[in-house]
């Protein structure tokens, strides 16, 4: 059965029943039952609070269900159960996640706002706005802000970018700008480390779920190298290998287990970190101690919460100078031999030119 056209207006009244029936026929039975429950409560005049899965699909499903049930905008509110709760005058329902319904809403929103001008800096279009807003999963107000912004998109259409003074749109733009800033921090301050198996690993703890948004950047930068980029806070991981980039969602235990892989560093990785720190210290600007103005500038452009994973700011990196891996000791033939040796046999190779001569 071909899918019906995307939703084109959340407040349409003509042919509403047939349009809703057409969409419902393509949805999962759980979603249809949920829409029926919303309809009954709306007829009774109840105010609703919908608990959504913290993802764009989950929240757009709730928006679409409210449309199908003909629930007035002012009578419904969206929350994420872990960060919000229903008010005393609200009836709480847990919303399902239906990718088909979410697609209807999202495609209809894109169609309604296509060609919008006046969007905030670093946000290309309303489609990107929705993605950036949904990344703020730790903000308790995010689901309702996304709900209202999508409603505004169907109301204002491509003029939505010119309504920045509207409080609802201003809140949405502030969240999206914050996500854009976190994505830029991710691109700037991630430091990959080489593991014993030759792959690269990095972890980062942003304030928004931006690893899925920025993973493509690292795919382009890392070339053919296999890598894993982990966000333990939001349980997101970007994995790249064999020319394929994948995004995984992990539970907290899996995320922390993966974060502990720093114990599997390549033998020469501490020395490489020390080289990087030596270069950073050599080119750093003066007057960056806590008692001088440069320290405030550093904190402004490089927030202190990000320093934990920066080897150039880690005093422990200095101790790596005590042992120089053979590959960095100036012996070209030995270095070539090490590079061509299997990972498991590198430990048996001589560690210095003197050992090479003795052998």
Image (spheres, rainbow, N blue to C red):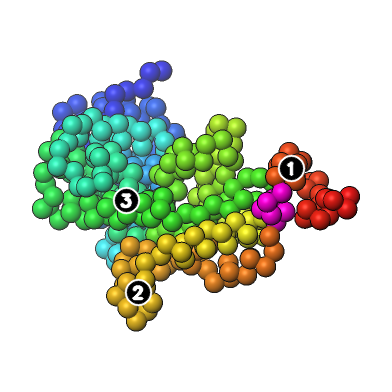
Q: Position of residue 213 (x, y in %)?
A: 40, 44
Q: Is residue 98 left or right of residue 8?
A: right
Residue 115 higher or lower than 228, as above or below: above
Query: Magenta stretch?
Result: 325-331
Q: Is residue 300 visible?
A: yes
**Label 3 environment density (alpha carbons within 10 Å; few <14, some 14–19, many ≥20):** many
Judging depth in this view, the residue of 266 and 263 nearest the camera is: 266
Q: Report helix, strand or loop for mark 1.
A: helix
Q: Position of residue 54 (x, y in %)?
A: 41, 51
Q: Report helix, strand or loop for mark 2.
A: loop
Q: Which residue is mark 3?
A: 180
Q: Rounded to the nearest whole Å, what is the CA distance between mark 2 and mark 1? A: 44 Å
Looking at the image, tell me whether mark 3 or mark 2 is earlier in sequence order.
Answer: 3
Q: Nearer the viewer, mark 2 or mark 1?
A: 1
Q: Which residue is mark 2?
A: 287
Q: Rounded to the nearest whole Å, what is the CA distance between mark 3 and mark 1? A: 47 Å
- What residue is shown at x 53% (from left), y 58% (from top)? 276
Q: Which residue is mark 1?
A: 333
Looking at the image, tell me whether mark 3 or mark 1 is earlier in sequence order.
Answer: 3
Q: Is residue 54 left or right of residue 237?
A: left
């Amino acid at each position: 059965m071909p899918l019906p056209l995307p939703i084109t207006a959340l407040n349409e009244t003509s042919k509403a029943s047939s349009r809703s029936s057409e969409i419902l026929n393509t949805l999962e039975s759980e979603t249809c039952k949920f829409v029926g429950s919303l309809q009954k409560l709306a007829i009774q005049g109840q105010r609703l609070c919908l608990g959504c899965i913290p993802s764009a699909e989950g929240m757009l499903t709730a928006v679409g269900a409210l449309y199908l049930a003909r629930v007035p905008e002012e009578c419904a509110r969206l929350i994420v159960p872990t960060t919000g709760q229903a008010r005393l005058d609200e009836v709480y329902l847990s919303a399902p996640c239906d990718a088909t319904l979410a697609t209807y809403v999202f495609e209809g929103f894109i169609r309604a706002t296509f060609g919008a001008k006046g969007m905030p800096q670093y946000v290309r279009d309303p489609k990107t706005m929705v993605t950036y807003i949904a990344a703020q999963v730790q903000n308790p107000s995010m689901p309702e802000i996304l709900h209202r912004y999508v409603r505004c998109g169907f109301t204002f259409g491509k003029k939505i970018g010119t309504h920045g003074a509207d409080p609802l749109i201003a809140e949405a733009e502030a969240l999206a700008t914050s996500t854009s800033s976190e994505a830029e921090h991710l691109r700037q301050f991630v430091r990959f480390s080489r593991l014993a198996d030759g792959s690269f690993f990095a972890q980062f703890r942003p304030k928004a779920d931006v690893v899925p948004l920025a993973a493509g950047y690292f795919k382009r930068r890392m070339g053919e190298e296999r890598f894993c980029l982990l966000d333990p806070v939001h349980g997101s991981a970007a994995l790249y290998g064999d020319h394929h980039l994948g995004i995984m969602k992990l539970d907290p235990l899996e995320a922390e287990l993966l974060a502990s892989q720093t114990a599997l560093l390549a033998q020469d990785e501490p020395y490489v970190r020390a080289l990087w720190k030596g270069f950073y210290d050599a080119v750093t600007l003066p007057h960056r101690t806590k008692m001088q103005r440069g320290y405030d500038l550093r904190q402004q452009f490089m927030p202190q919460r990000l320093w934990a994973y920066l080897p150039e700011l880690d005093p422990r990196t200095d101790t790596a100078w005590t042992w120089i891996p053979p590959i960095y000791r100036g012996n070209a033939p030995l270095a070539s031999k090490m590079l061509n040796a299997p990972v498991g046999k590198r430990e048996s190779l001589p560690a210095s030119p003197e050992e090479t001569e003795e052998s």
